[in-house]
Image (tube, rainbow, N blue to C red):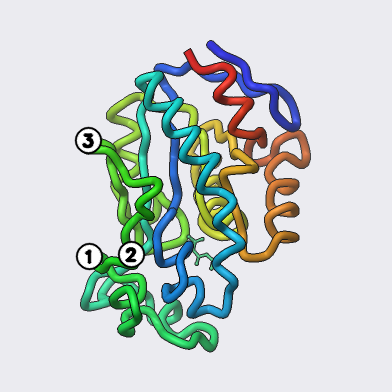
Amino acid sequence: MVTVGARPFPYTFEPATAALLVIDMQRDFLEPGGFGESLGNDVSQLRRTIAPTAALLAGWRAAGLPVIHTREGHLPDLSDCPPAKLARGAPSMRIGDPGPKGRILIRGEYGHDIIDELAPLPGEPVVDKPGKGAFHATELQSLLDRDGIRSLVVTGVTTEVCVHTTVREANDRGYECLVLADCVGSYFPHFHETGLEMIAAQGGIFGWVASSSDVLAVLP
Ligand code: TIU
């Protein structure tokens, strides 16, 4: 067992039953011309997460521990996209529309894939998800069951949307989630800060919060 200094109290995990979850670090959210920008967001807000996540990935992989990536997106015929999701808001481009990096948030398009800096290695699962949470309509639960994973170290974007939804889903399923503040990000800095507070509040109602250096310091 190893223990990480975390909020609201130290987080203890068994490396053999832990996985690093990298949520939706896709061009569609982190680069101009994608889904994030089409919703009116300043995508540069998310880029501070890239360097610490790359360093954490390097250390986590060097320790021989499993990494699971996720991508939010939809089938080309949009059959897995609820009408309400398609219609919501007043985006400059809707899911499925052609953009500079391909069709917005569509599987197989350049913009839908993970940014070069954090590219998955061969053998690392990439879970494609139609929703904000990584468990809904995906194989994530069976992947975790297969490998006996109980602890999830969580990174990715955005703090209050896909990270929060996934952590809440995971917490209800009995996983212990450690969210790394420097490796998650939001288009809205105050949502990011408040989102982290919400996880650690009430004695860790959904999980724990630490930073990547806290985890790197304890890896075997
Ligand atoms: N991955 C993820 O968080 N999807 C979003 O749509 N996030 C927003 O903040 N919009």
Residue type at mark 1: give it. Answer: Gly
Other-residue count near label 3 (Cα within 10 Å), few / some / many at <14 / 14–19 / ≥20: few
Instruction: Using the image, tell me which numbered label, if any, was put on residue 123.
Output: 3
Residue at image x 28%, y 41%?
A: 125
Up-down: is 175 above or below 94? Answer: above
Residue type at mark 3: give it. Answer: Gly
Residue 68 percent coordinates (x, y):
36, 39
Residue at image x 43%, y 34%?
A: 57
46, 175: nearer the viewer? 46
Instruction: Using the image, tell me which numbered label, if any, was put on residue 197.
Output: none
Q: Are marks 1 and 2 in contact (CB under 8 Å)?
A: yes
Residue 120 sits in quarter: top left
Residue at image x 37%, y 79%?
A: 95
Residue type at mark 2: give it. Answer: His
136, 214: nearer the viewer? 214
Q: Is residue 169 left or right of residue 182?
A: left
Residue at image x 75%, y 54%?
A: 194
Give the structural element (helix, strand or loop) at label 1: loop
Other-residue count near label 1 (Cα within 10 Å), few / some / many at <14 / 14–19 / ≥20: some
Give the structural element (helix, strand or loop) at label 3: loop
Identify the residue position indicated by label 1 in the image: 108
Residue 2 percent coordinates (x, y):
56, 13
Q: Give the tally of numbered discs.
A: 3
Distance from Cα at disc 2 to Cα at disc 3: 19 Å
| Mark 2 vs 3, N-terminal side | 2
Identify the residue position indicated by label 2 in the image: 112
Give the structural element (helix, strand or loop) at label 2: helix
Q: Are marks 2 and 3 in contact (CB under 8 Å)?
A: no
